Image: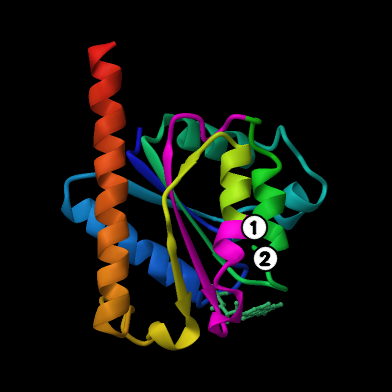
């Protein structure tokens, strides 16, 4: 089983939120955790549109999420919230799919106008799936350099915010792991 699953909610091919989430995933991998990405674009559109709970791809994604110790959930802001296609995917997961899992939310937006979308939209969705959301990171488009895949987070202050949140996320995973070992 993979330690951390990155769930990327952008339908865009060259996605900023995906780059930011994978940057956090890379930091976690550097600390010895295994990381795998699941993107909404991995699924047949029909699976999502027709809510095919029994699609093998959806079932497999659910198993990978169930077996993970923590999740990074990323979405661009679309109309002041997460994307519809991310919701379409998460709707197909069991009700407590994120139970006991620390979840690092990451959102990107065209401007800072919707930075609270992470608090009023994405975190409640994570909590509804029984996940344990961290503070999370909101980035504006200009914070991400799509040309530099190794270091897509363009400025130091933003990279530091992702670093801090990723470290807290890993600490939460290790705390959960230590607590479950004691039981
Ligand atoms: C359909 C659509 C709706 C959007 N709505 C918003 C919005 O309400 N607020 C905002 O700040 N940015 C909005 N944006 C801009 C995206 O959130 C932003 O460019 C984001 O970084 C794109 O991420 P991605 O490359 O991962 O898809 C919107 C973009 C699209 C395509």
- Tell me which corner region of the image, top left, top right, bottom left or bottom right, holds residue 59: top right
Q: Residues within 10 Å of mark 1 (few under 14, many from 20)?
A: some
- Observer-nearest of 84 and 49: 84
- Tags 1 and 2 in contact by the CB under 8 Å rule? yes
- Please give the range of residues in magenta: 96-121
Q: Height in image: 51 above or below 164? A: above
The residue drawn where x is 42% and y is 55% is 135
Residue 58 coordinates in the image, percent (x, y): 62, 40
Residue 112 coordinates in the image, percent (x, y): 54, 81
Per the image, is 164 magenta?
A: no
Per the image, is 98 magenta?
A: yes
Is residue 177 shown left or right of residue 142? left
Q: Height in image: 183 above or below 103? A: above
Q: Which of marks 1 and 2 is nearer the N terminus?
A: 2
The residue drawn where x is 29% and y is 56% is 166
Is disc 2's CB within 8 Å of ligand 1? yes
Checking the image for residue 121, the label placed there is 1
Is residue 69 shown left or right of residue 78? left
SS at circle 2: loop
Q: Which image quarter holds the N terminus?
A: top left
Checking the image for residue 81, the label placed there is 2
Is residue 51 shown left or right of residue 143? right
Give the quadrant of ligand 1: bottom right
């Amino acid at each position: 089983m993979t330690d951390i699953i990155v769930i990327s909610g952008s339908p865009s091919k060259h996605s900023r939120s995906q780059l930011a989430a994978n940057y956090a995933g890379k930091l976690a991998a550097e600390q010895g955790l295994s990381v795998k990405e699941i993107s909404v674009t991995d699924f047949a559109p029909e699976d999502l549109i027709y809510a095919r709970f029994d699609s093998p791809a959806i079932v497999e994604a659910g198993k990978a999420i169930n077996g993970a110790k923590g999740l990074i959930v990323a979405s661009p802001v679309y109309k002041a919230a997460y994307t519809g296609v991310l919701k379409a995917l998460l709707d197909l997961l069991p009700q407590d799919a994120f139970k006991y899992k620390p979840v690092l939310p990451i959102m990107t937006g065209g401007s800072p106008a919707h930075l609270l979308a992470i608090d009023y939209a994405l975190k409640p969705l994570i909590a509804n799936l029984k996940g344990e959301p961290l503070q999370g990171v909101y980035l504006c488009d200009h914070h991400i350099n799509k040309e530099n895949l190794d270091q897509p987070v363009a400025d130091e202050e933003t990279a530091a915010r992702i670093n801090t949140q990723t470290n807290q996320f890993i600490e939460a995973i290790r705390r959960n792991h230590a607590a479950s070992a004691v039981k």
